[in-house]
Amino acid sequence: MVTAQLRRVAGSVVDPELRAVTIEELGILRDVRVDPDSGRVVVTITPTYAGCPAMDTIRADIRRALDAAGHPDAEVRTVLSPAWSTDRISEAGRAKLTAAGIAPPGPARGGPGPARSPAGPAGPARSTAGPVALVLSVRCPRCGSPQTEQLSRFGSTACKALWRCRACLEPFEHIKAL
């Protein structure tokens, strides 16, 4: 089996917490290769965050998929660097999340470290550089309305928040931008 086929097999594994998307669409799957010395398939994945409880299930599901494809000795490696970002979610993955009633994240807002300004009459030193993350609203994945409100910073998993649409009154989860 060529590497592209192996990647399709491994990439077709569905994320156990976000059942609407595969690990390829979510951007967890980093690399699939065949070790030239051993001939063993080596899959590299990165968790959505370091303590993600779904990683054991994902590793087992990848091994099971590759075993069914004739590679029972596949190795799954987990790497933390570079860190996963919500920017790795594919457009197809974002569309599938929306169709499943989960609001996909906007772009991650990384930037330079904070610059400090000296204390003055206005008070203590404050950060003056870099972006300020301010979410005014999240579009409802059901009706598209921007009239939404956050109910809880944490949803069913640590990477999601619970929101409600004021227009259609439906609750929904939103994946946090990382």
Image (cartoon, rainbow, N blue to C red):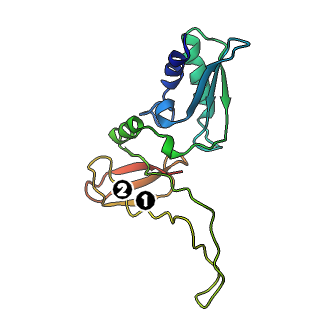
Establish if 106 lies above or below 122: above
Residue at left 52%, top 36%? 27
Looking at this view, is 28 or 102 the one in front? 28
Label 1: which secondary element: strand
Looking at this view, is 134 or 116 the one in front? 116
Q: Which mark is residue 73?
A: none
Label 2: which secondary element: strand
Image quarter (top left, top right, bottom left or bottom right) of the N terminus? top right
Q: Position of residue 164 (x, y in %)?
A: 36, 56
Q: Which residue is mark 1?
A: 151
Q: Position of residue 26 (x, y in %)?
A: 49, 36
Q: Give the mark nearest the N terminus, 2 or 1.
A: 1
Left or right of 132, for residue 95: left
Left or right of 57, for residue 161: left
Q: Could you tell me how many numbered marks the image carries?
A: 2
How far apart in space, not on screen, are marks 2 and 1 (Cα)?
7 Å
Single out the residue that lies furthest toward the right: 37
Residue at left 38%, top 49%? 172
Q: Position of residue 62 (x, y in %)?
A: 57, 22
Which amino acid lies under the numbered mark 1 shown in the image of this protein?
Leu
Establish if 126 lies above or below 14: below
Image quadrant assignment for residue 71: top right
Q: Are marks 2 and 1 in contact (CB under 8 Å)?
A: yes
- How crowded pointer 1 is (Cα within 10 Å; few <14, some 14-19, many 20+) is rated as some
Residue at left 27%, top 55%? 145
Establish if 22 lies above or below 163: above
Q: Which residue is mark 2?
A: 164
Q: Position of residue 85 (x, y in %)?
A: 54, 45
Image quadrant assignment for residue 52: top right
Image quadrant assignment for residue 148: bottom left
Which amino acid lies under the numbered mark 2 shown in the image of this protein?
Arg
